[in-house]
Image (cartoon, rainbow, N blue to C red):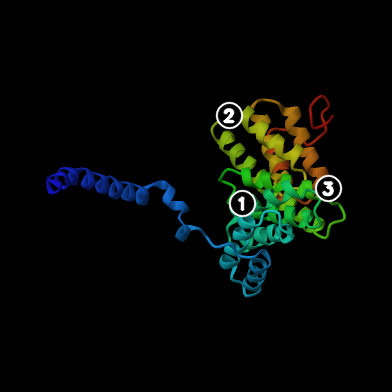
């Protein structure tokens, strides 16, 4: 009789075992498995990570240094090494050509340490990261504008920084790039008979990018566009300004001939934006 009872209870035992087995399988497949001890990244002391990063940087192993520094950021966000690590991370990303990552690393540093001892250097690296991505003038020049903004911020906040002068030179190059884009678009409008749109582009170069190498041509193109609109006074003024500032310029010689062919000569005619 006891044997019969045992046989009756056996299905319940088997069912319980099956449930336990299924639970184990589900646990193994659960997303919570990512927190299992085998998957937890070991905590490495901050000074050890920092030392490893320095060694890798000295050996120009920038990718390895980046791994050390990112791990230091994640595992020890409030460590004494964290501020310097962020500077190194910005530099390592910049040197390895990871310019977008360098900008993000710079932003993290500047958000936490806006007046940090190396804030000027981080701003310089950020601006340089934009600068290195500037492409030819036929492309969008948003990155050139970002470089200009960053370098000018460096100059205004840290006028005595050792990076201020170099950043000024990079601003000039970046502005020349932006002006070149304006000229490219202006020439397109001029060639397609959209004279007012062309004038707006060339005027931007003359007014906003006076240190660029494109001002001479911009003044000549203004004279061309104004003549096509029948505005001889503005055309004469543009060439007069060109001759005053760039008397030996090829563009002035071309402008002089352009006016001469219309029976005109360069002169400052009052009543327009160039003679104000």
Query: Hey, which quadrant is residue 74 in on the image?
Result: bottom right
Q: How many angstroms separate mark 3 from mark 1 (CA)?
A: 24 Å
Distance Cα–Cα, label 1 vs label 2: 28 Å
Q: Percent from the top left, x then y, of residue 42? A: 54, 63
Residue 133, how many percent across, how many down?
Answer: 60, 53
- Of pointers 3 and 1, the one earlier in the residue sequence: 1
For label 1, the crowd category at 10 Å Cα-Cα, with few meaning under 14, some 14 to 19 and many 20 or more, is many
Q: How far apart are labels 3 and 2 at the CA level?
A: 42 Å
Can the viewer see residue 29?
yes
In the picture of the structure, the residue carrying the numbered disc 2 is: 194
Looking at the rendered structure, the secondary structure element under dot 1 is loop
At 83% from the left edge and 60% from the top edge, which residue is drawn?
A: 162
Find residue 186 and report its horizontal and vertical position in percent: 61, 37
Image quadrant holding the N terminus, namely: top left
Q: Nearer the viewer, mark 3 or mark 2?
A: 3
Compared with residue 190, is residue 19 higher up or lower down, i.e. above or below? Answer: below
In which quadrant is the C terminus drawn? Answer: top right
Who's the residue at 71% across and 40% down the image? 205
From the image, tell me which residue sits under label 1.
134
Residue 243, x across and y down, in percent: 79, 44
Mark 3 / mark 2, whichever is N-terminal: 3
Q: Nearer the viewer, mark 1 or mark 2?
A: 1
**SS label for mark 2:** loop
Sort mark 2 into few (<14), some (14-19) or many (20+) by Cα contacts within 10 Å.
Answer: some
């Amino acid at each position: 009789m006891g044997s019969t009872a045992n046989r009756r209870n056996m299905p319940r035992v088997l069912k319980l075992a099956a449930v336990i087995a299924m639970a184990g399988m589900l646990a193994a497949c659960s997303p919570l498995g990512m927190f299992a001890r085998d998957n937890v990244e070991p905590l490495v002391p901050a000074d050890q990570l920092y030392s490893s990063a320095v060694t890798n940087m000295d050996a120009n192993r920038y990718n390895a240094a980046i791994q050390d520094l990112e791990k230091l950021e994640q595992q020890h966000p409030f460590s004494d090494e964290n501020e310097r690590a962020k500077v190194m991370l910005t530099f390592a990303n910049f040197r390895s050509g990871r310019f977008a990552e360098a900008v993000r690393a710079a932003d993290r540093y500047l958000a936490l340490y806006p007046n940090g001892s190396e804030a000027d250097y981080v701003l310089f690296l950020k601006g340089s990261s934009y600068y290195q991505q500037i492409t030819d003038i036929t492309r969008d020049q948003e990155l050139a504008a970002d470089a200009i903004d960053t370098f000018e911020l460096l100059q205004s906040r840290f006028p005595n920084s050792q990076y201020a002068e170099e950043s000024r030179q990079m601003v000039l190059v970046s502005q020349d790039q932006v002006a070149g884009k304006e000229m490219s678009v202006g020439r397109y409008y001029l060639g397609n008979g959209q004279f007012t749109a062309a004038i707006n582009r060339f005027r931007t170069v003359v007014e906003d990018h006076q240190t660029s190498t494109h001002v001479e041509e911009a003044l000549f193109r203004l004279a061309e566009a104004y003549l096509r609109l029948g505005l001889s006074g503005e055309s004469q003024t543009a060439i007069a300004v060109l001759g005053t500032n760039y008397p030996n310029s090829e563009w002035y010689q071309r402008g002089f001939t352009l006016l001469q062919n219309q029976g005109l000569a360069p002169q400052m005619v009052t009543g327009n934006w160039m003679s104000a």
